[in-house]
Amino acid sequence: MVTSVTSAAQTTASQNATSKAAISADFDTFLKMMTTQMKNQDPLNPIDSADYAVQLATFSGVEQQMKTNQLLGGLSSQFGVLGMAQLAAWVGQEARSSAPVFLGDAAVTVFYTPAATADRAVLVARNTAGDVVAREDVPLDGSAYQWTGTDISGKPLPNGTYALTLESYNGEDQLGQAGPVESYAQIMEARGGANGATLVLAGGVEVAATEITALRVP
């Protein structure tokens, strides 16, 4: 975790140094071009001094805009590092989300909310290929449910990652689209990225930090 935060800070510093070097090189190039322009101007028709002033003002404006963009980028990166530092306290805790679950040797505790008018709820499990590998009726009370990970024929599913959803029915009619199923999993690692922080859960399941709905101490 400390390595991730340090790496992000080092990357920010490197990017800032590169941007400063680029601005300095561009300014030097601009001065060389202006000097060359002055040396090679027509003596009978010299360039108006006002034109030089406009060129200097234009470059100065571009330079300031680049520095502003650089500053904003640096602040954004620092906020990202700060977020990673705060997420360090999450590592080791259990996070609740609707991310796929890792099925090991023990049952997985899941949480769901059937549709209000449902008279039947079905838990659906899909493997990493997206194939339905299990379907089972579950209670309608919405209490925690122990999913043991058995297939349609009742045989144990192999250990691995499965995506769970809940289908609500009234009679034979399915009510809307399948809903999310949440579960708790221990946070093993926090990673930064262009799209924000990502948490790595037990079993290698990855979920965005923004998708965590609850935390608890194991």
Image (cartoon, grey):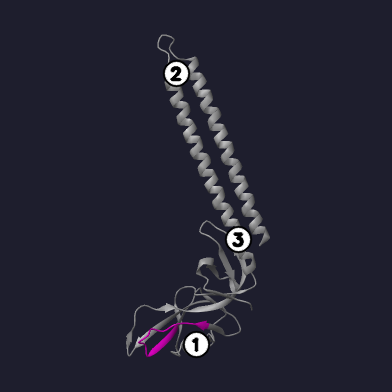
Q: Quadrant of residue 170?
A: bottom left
Position of 64 relative to 119 (above/below): above
Q: Earlier in the sequence, mark 1 or mark 2?
A: 2
Q: CA distance from mark 3 to mark 1?
A: 33 Å
Residue underneath mark 1: 143
Q: Quadrant of residue 114?
A: bottom left
- Is residue 115 covered in magenta? yes
* Quadrant into which the C terminus falls: bottom right
Residue drawn 48% across the image and 39% down it: 65
Callout 1: 10 Å neighbours few (<14), some, many (20+)?
few
Position of 27 relative to 79 (above/below): above
Q: Earlier in the sequence, mark 3 or mark 1?
A: 3
> Type of residue at label 1?
Ser
> Type of residue at label 2?
Ser
Residue underneath mark 3: 84
Residue drawn 56% across the image and 48% down it: 74
Q: Position of residue 38 (x, y in %)?
A: 48, 17
Residue underneath mark 2: 49
Q: Position of residue 67 (x, y in %)?
A: 53, 40
Disc number lying in front (1 or 2): 2
Q: CA distance from mark 1 to mark 2?
A: 80 Å
Q: Earlier in the sequence, mark 3 or mark 2?
A: 2
- Stretch in magenta: 110-123
Say which of 211 and 78 sits in front: 78
> Type of residue at label 3?
Met
